[in-house]
Image (tube, rainbow, N blue to C red):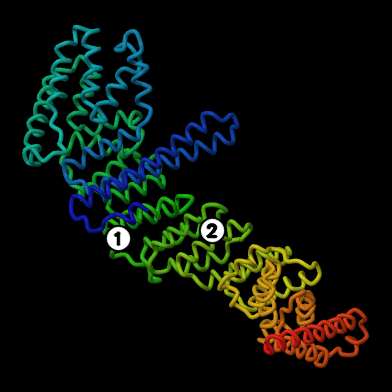
């Protein structure tokens, strides 16, 4: 994400430095994972788990090896001179068993007599670690005064060896001239037989001269053809140019493997990098590695380096986007990593939105919390269709579990009028059966959402009537009740309940309904009894008949009281 947000405007060296830093960050993450896996492998006692962790360590190690080489050749694009120094660092970083040998040798009573002494000196020389090699050789000189003269000459040669510098203080021509003089001096001492009495020192002098046979004799110490390649370049062509690498790499691999074994997949990937075949590197890694993490992130980085612009895939998307889409799709199949996939889709300009819409619809909404997370993602990206779909699914789930409040809030969020009407009916039915409302907080705070459907409006207003009645604001309650009936907001099936709710107001000591309002109530009652399709059933039902009679009586009494009251007011 840092790379996506980084400043594209930075130009030249500062942009390159920024991209190299990003690449190093990636490698440090891979290394940290490798350390964790290694610790896990060491601490577990289960052999199967140990094997699993060790495999992970070797995969991560190979990934970091490839990434590091790509960083040197493609991201940093090291030039002749610094290129060799970078490759030396690369080899040193990935050869791990040297340090333990050094500790064994230096920890012994007489280091120069240790069976691994010359092996360690040779490894230091093969890796261009001259100071460490000279330090060890001084132990041999101290222990064996007879070889002191030989040691001094070899030490002087190693000390004087010209190496490229990262700063531009010397030109390549100067370096090549110095190196040529030094090379001739080494040649002279070898031909004079200066080291003839000590085969170990003679062998080191041959390595300094870049003698391929002498270097290949140390094959066991180098372990890999690419170590051999870098050693060979160090002592025969330190000013190698990037485009010359392919020839040296191919011949080094052929010489090192010597037809005894065929190249491994890792060898082919590294060879493709040395040949500057970026697309081949990505292709081979896609085939060999178990998931898309590595190729997706490396390709994205190379794309930011403007190295893949020319390569479009046949179906319209570029390689970066194709790999990011594949990786993010993989994340979406994981129960908790799917949220990370969203960020990847966000940074795919061509198909990211479409993929996100398709994947988000397939997320199992197992909990309300998860549904809210998905919803937030959709709302932030104005994915209105998906928002409605999620809300409908959650409303149905809540309704099935008889959680009416939750169902109503989801249907309001979905702006689904039909569903809100259905749930409002369920609320009213519940009220008729139980005599009270569930989820009062929700109904009290509907606000403008109550306008979503007529039934929801009625539910909100009816609840408001109860609140006014509870607060003994009878005149307002009476007005609201009458409005609900005369404006036809209330469903006809609910009129009887509303008229029954009017009874206590009609029976109050003070007159609440005016004559006009009382006539309206009377008309509603007559409409209800006359227009009821189940008129016969209505008449046969004793309870309903009693209610109607009581209402008629209450309305007549109220009308009489109100006429007297209004007459008195007008008469006075």
Q: Quadrant of residue 11?
A: bottom left
Pinpoint residue 493: horizontal percent, then vertical percent.
77, 82
Residue that appears at 26% across and 59% down: 306
Question: Residue 54, can we see it?
Answer: yes
Q: Is residue 23 left or right of residue 9?
A: right
SS state under label 1 = loop
Q: Residues within 10 Å of mark 2 (few under 14, many from 20)?
A: few
Residue that appears at 14% across and 28% down: 161
Pinpoint residue 469: horizontal percent, then vertical percent.
70, 70
Where 370 falls versus 412 (above or below)?
Answer: above
Where 244 falls versus 563 (above or below)?
Answer: above
Q: Quadrant of residue 545?
A: bottom right
Residue that appears at 27% across and 51% down: 275
Residue 373, numbered label: 2
Where 59 falls versus 561 (above or below)?
Answer: above
Pinpoint residue 90: horizontal percent, then vertical percent.
29, 38
Residue 500, numbered label: none
SS state under label 2 = helix
Depth-wise, is mark 2 or mark 1 nearer the camera?
2
Labels 2 and 1: the sequence-earlier one = 1
Out of 401 and 448, give the one closest to the viewer: 448
Pinpoint residue 384: horizontal percent, then vertical percent.
51, 72
Q: Which residue is mark 1?
A: 308
Out of 435 and 1, give the one closest to the viewer: 435
Question: Residue 250, can we see it?
Answer: no
Out of 179 and 68, give the one closest to the viewer: 68
* CA distance separating discs 2 and 1: 35 Å
């Amino acid at each position: 994400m840092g790379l996506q947000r980084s400043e594209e405007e930075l130009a030249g060296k500062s942009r390159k430095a920024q991209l190299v830093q990003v690449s190093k960050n990636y490698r440090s993450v891979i290394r940290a994972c490798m350390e964790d896996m290694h610790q896990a492998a060491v601490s577990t006692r289960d052999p199967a788990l140990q094997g699993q962790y060790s495999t992970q360590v070797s995969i991560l190690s190979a990934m970091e090896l490839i990434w590091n080489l790509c960083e040197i050749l493609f991201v940093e694009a090291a030039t002749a001179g610094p290129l060799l120094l970078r490759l030396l660092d690369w080899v040193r970083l990935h050869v791990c068993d040297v340090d333990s040998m050094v500790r064994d040798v230096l920890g012994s009573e007489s280091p120069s007599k240790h069976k691994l002494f010359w092996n360690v000196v040779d490894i230091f020389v093969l890796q261009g670690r001259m100071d460490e090699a000279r330090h060890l050789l001084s132990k041999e000189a101290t222990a064996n005064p007879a070889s002191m003269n030989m040691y001094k000459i070899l030490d002087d040669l190693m000390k004087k060896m010209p190496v490229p510098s990262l700063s531009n203080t010397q030109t390549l021509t100067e370096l090549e001239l110095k190196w040529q003089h030094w090379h001739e001096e080494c040649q002279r001492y070898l031909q004079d037989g200066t080291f003839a009495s000590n085969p170990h020192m003679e062998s080191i002098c041959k390595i300094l001269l870049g003698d391929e046979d002498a270097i290949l004799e140390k094959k066991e110490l180098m372990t890999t053809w690419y170590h051999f390649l870098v050693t060979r370049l160090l002592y025969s062509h330190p000013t190698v140019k990037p485009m010359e690498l392919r020839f040296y790499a191919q011949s080094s691999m052929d010489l090192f493997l010597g037809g005894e074994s065929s190249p491994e997949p890792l060898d082919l990937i590294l060879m493709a990098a040395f040949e500057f075949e970026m697309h081949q590197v990505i292709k081979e890694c896609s085939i060999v590695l178990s998931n898309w993490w590595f190729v997706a992130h490396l390709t994205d980085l190379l794309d930011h380096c403007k190295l893949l612009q020319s390569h479009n895939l046949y179906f319209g998307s570029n390689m970066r986007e194709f790999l990011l889409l594949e990786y993010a799709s993989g994340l979406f199949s994981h129960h908790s990593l799917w949220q990370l996939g969203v960020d990847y889709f966000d940074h795919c300009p061509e198909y990211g939105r479409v993929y996100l819409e398709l994947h988000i619809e397939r997320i199992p909404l197992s909990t309300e919390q998860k549904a809210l997370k998905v919803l937030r993602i959709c709302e932030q990206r104005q994915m209105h269709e998906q928002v409605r779909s999620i809300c409908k699914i959650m409303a149905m789930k809540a309704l099935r579990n008889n959680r009416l409040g939750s169902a109503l809030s989801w249907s309001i969020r979905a702006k689904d009028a039909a569903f809100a009407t259905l749930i409002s009916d369920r609320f009213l039915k519940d009220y008729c059966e139980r005599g009270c409302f569930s989820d009062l907080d929700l109904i009290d705070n509907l606000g403008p959402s109550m306008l979503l459907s007529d039934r929801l409006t009625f539910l909100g207003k009816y609840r408001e009537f109860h609140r006014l009645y509870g607060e003994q604001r009878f005149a307002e309650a009476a007005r609201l009740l009458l409005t609900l009936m005369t404006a036809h907001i209330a469903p006809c099936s609910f009129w009887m309940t509303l008229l029954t709710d009017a009874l206590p107001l009609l029976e109050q000591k003070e007159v609440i309904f005016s004559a006009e309002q009382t006539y309206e109530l009377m008309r509603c009652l007559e409409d209800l009894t006359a227009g009821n399709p189940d008129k016969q059933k209505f008449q046969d039902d004793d309870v309903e008949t009693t209610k109607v009679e009581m209402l008629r009586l209450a309305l007549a009494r109220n009308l009489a009281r109100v006429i007297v009251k209004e007459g008195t007011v007008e008469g006075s």
